[in-house]
């Protein structure tokens, strides 16, 4: 059995999608690949991790205390929360995490982890 892994944008496997019209970012549930994608404080993978999306339960649990949390997919974000694509920042996408309460936090995802469609 062959497994693919995405980690911090180091591999070419795309697990996320940005809707070209709405700019909303999503990661579908029940993907057939193993993945681990981190969002960072700045457009640099050596800065603080802000959010994690992973297929492995242990990875999700280990990163639950990140500022924006840790999830299997975007369907599991808190009620009313959404992630919006704001534009490119080098090899990263600048994202906005909007909570159901209206609080906005900017973070950066490696471009290799999502596609714009």
Image (cartoon, grey):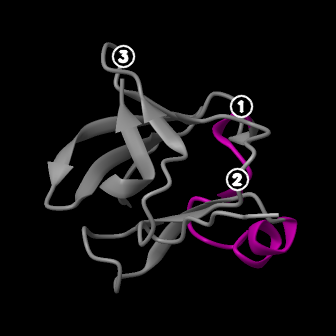
**Which comes sooner in the sequence, label 1 or label 3?**
3
Q: Quadrant of the N terminus?
A: bottom right
Q: Nearer the viewer, residue 56 or 63?
A: 56
**Which comes sooner in the sequence, label 3 or label 2?**
3
Select label 1 or label 3 by which is in front.
3
Highlighted range, magenta: 57-75
Q: In the image as oriented, which residue stretches furthest toward the front?
A: 1
Contact between labelled residues 2 and 3, with CB atoms less than 8 Å apart: no
Neighbour tally class for label 1: few under 14, some 14-19, many 20 plus, Cα within 10 Å: few
Neighbour tally class for label 3: few under 14, some 14-19, many 20 plus, Cα within 10 Å: few
Task: Please determine whether, in this image, residue 88 is positioned above or below residue 84.
Answer: below
Q: Nearer the viewer, residue 27 or 84?
A: 27
Contact between labelled residues 2 and 1, with CB atoms less than 8 Å apart: no
Judging by the rendered image, the residue that carries numbered circle 3 is 22
Select label 1 or label 2 by which is in front.
2
Cα–Cα span, label 1 and label 2? 26 Å
Judging by the rendered image, the residue that carries numbered circle 1 is 79
Q: Quadrant of the C terminus?
A: top left
Tell me which corner region of the image, top left, top right, bottom left or bottom right, holds residue 65: bottom right
Q: Nearer the viewer, residue 98 or 33?
A: 33
Picture coordinates of residue 101 (x, y %)? 57, 34
Judging by the rendered image, the residue that carries numbered circle 2 is 33
Picture coordinates of residue 61 (x, y %)? 82, 71
Asked which secondary structure carries label 2, the reply is: loop
């Amino acid at each position: 059995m062959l497994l693919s892994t995405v980690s911090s944008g180091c591999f070419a496997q795309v697990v996320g999608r940005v809707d070209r019209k709405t700019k909303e970012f999503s990661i579908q549930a029940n993907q057939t690949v193993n993945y681990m994608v981190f969002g960072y404080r700045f457009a640099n993978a050596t800065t603080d991790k802000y959010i994690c999306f992973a297929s492995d339960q242990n990875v999700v649990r280990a990163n639950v205390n990140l500022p924006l949390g840790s999830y299997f997919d975007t369907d599991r974000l808190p009620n009313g929360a959404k992630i919006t694509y704001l534009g490119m920042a080098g090899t990263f996408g600048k994202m906005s995490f909007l909570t159901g309460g209206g609080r906005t936090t900017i973070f950066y995802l490696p471009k290799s982890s999502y596609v714009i469609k």
